[in-house]
């Protein structure tokens, strides 16, 4: 499967996350995690595990993001690792039953998940870990194919602002151009090269499923890209080998 077509399953050990953000400033924001993950591919499965009676204030934003909440009773009733075991069983069951899911995301810093990560990799899955710096084991972070710290998502740079030669963008089109620049920045961050027009549109639709260029007055996605180039926002060229499709070279400095 091509890198641009990744399908993701996300498993969240919420109690481990709570250890990391319990004594820090600011509220935990699940949007920051999901925004980063949709840049990598299509998120198919989203599950979070915890004794939700202890984390009621977080259930609403999780529900709003279509995350399935798996209730794990209090640890003194079922044993210390009940949530870990349930998460690991569900992840392996999905790995064996859904071959089209090629990327597994373990949102936790618990070293107990290292065997799960190793087994997923044995089964040909790409594994991404996400955790808080304060509660992440070095063993887990080093065992994943990629590990992202939540704190780094909080300070993730925004898309570049247009250069001085850029033509003013009408207010009614600012939203679509902001989304366009954010999506191109995401592809650059993921080291995609070349960046085909179809990759940009796919990323925009994953970030905002309701996106449609016609809502902003464009007859085609190519028309949107050409307008962005005309306004001095991006640089384009056409790739002869790919059937003369448009390729984004980058931002105009």
Image: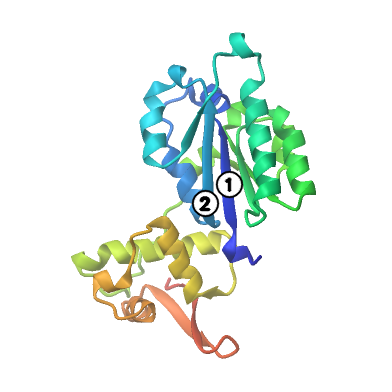
Q: Nearer the viewer, residue 101 or 155?
A: 101
Q: How far apart are marks 1 and 2 (CA)?
A: 6 Å
Name which residue lies at 39% across and 22% down.
56
Rate crowding at label 1 as few (under 14), some (14 to 19) or many (20 or more) other CA atoms within 10 Å.
Answer: many
- Residue 213 position in % (x across, y down): 32, 71
- Residue 217 position in % (x across, y down): 24, 75
Residue 240 is at least partly visible in this image: yes
Residue 156 is at least partly visible in this image: no
Name which residue lies at 44% across and 21% down.
55
Of the two numbered discs 1 and 2 on the same chain, state the one appearing first in sequence: 1
By what rule are the colours in the image chosen?
rainbow
Name the side, left or right, on which 80 lies relative to 180. right
Rate crowding at label 2 as few (under 14), some (14 to 19) or many (20 or more) other CA atoms within 10 Å.
Answer: many
Name which residue lies at 58% across and 75% down.
194
> Could you say which disc has been placed on residue 9 in the image?
1
Q: Is residue 228 above or below residue 94?
A: below
Name which residue lies at 70% across and 32% down.
113
Q: Number of callouts in the render? A: 2
Extreme-front residue of the structure: 97
- Residue 246 position in % (x across, y down): 48, 82
Q: In which quarter of the image is the N terminus?
A: bottom right
Q: In which quarter of the image is the C terminus?
A: bottom left
Q: In this view, does 79 lie above or below 217?
A: above
Residue 107, picture quadrant: top right
Dot 1 lies on which element? strand
Name the side, left or right, on which 20 lies relative to 213. right
Residue 214, picture quadrant: bottom left
> Could you say which disc has been placed on residue 43 in the image?
2
Extreme-left residue of the structure: 171
User: Is there a contact, CB below 8 Å, between mark 1 and mark 2?
Assistant: yes
Dot 2 lies on which element? strand
């Amino acid at each position: 499967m091509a890198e641009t077509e990744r399908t993701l399953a996300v498993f969240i050990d919420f109690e481990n996350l709570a250890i990391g953000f319990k004594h820090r400033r600011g509220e935990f924001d699940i949007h920051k995690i999901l925004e980063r993950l949709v840049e990598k591919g299509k998120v198919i499965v989203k599950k979070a595990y915890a004794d939700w009676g202890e984390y009621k204030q977080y259930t609403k934003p999780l529900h709003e993001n279509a995350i399935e909440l798996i209730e794990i009773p209090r640890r003194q009733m079922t044993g210390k690792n009940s949530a870990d075991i349930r998460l690991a069983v569900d992840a392996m069951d999905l790995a064996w039953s859904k071959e089209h899911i090629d990327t597994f995301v373990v949102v936790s810093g618990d070293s107990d998940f290292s065997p799960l990560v190793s087994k997923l990799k044995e089964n040909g899955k790409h594994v991404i870990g996400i955790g808080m710096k304060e509660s992440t084991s070095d063993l887990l972070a080093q065992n994943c194919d990629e590990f992202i710290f939540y704190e780094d998502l909080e300070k993730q740079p925004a898309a570049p602002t247009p250069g001085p030669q850029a033509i003013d963008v009408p207010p009614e089109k600012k939203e679509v151009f902001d989304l366009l620049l954010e999506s191109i920045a995401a592809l650059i961050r993921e080291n995609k090269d070349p960046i085909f027009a179809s990759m940009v549109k796919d990323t925009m639709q994953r970030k905002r499923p309701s996106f449609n260029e016609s809502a902003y007055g464009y007859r085609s996605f190519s028309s949107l890209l050409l307008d962005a180039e005309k306004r001095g926002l991006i640089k384009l060229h056409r790739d002869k080998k790919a059937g003369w499709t448009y390729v984004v070279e980058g931002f105009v400095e």
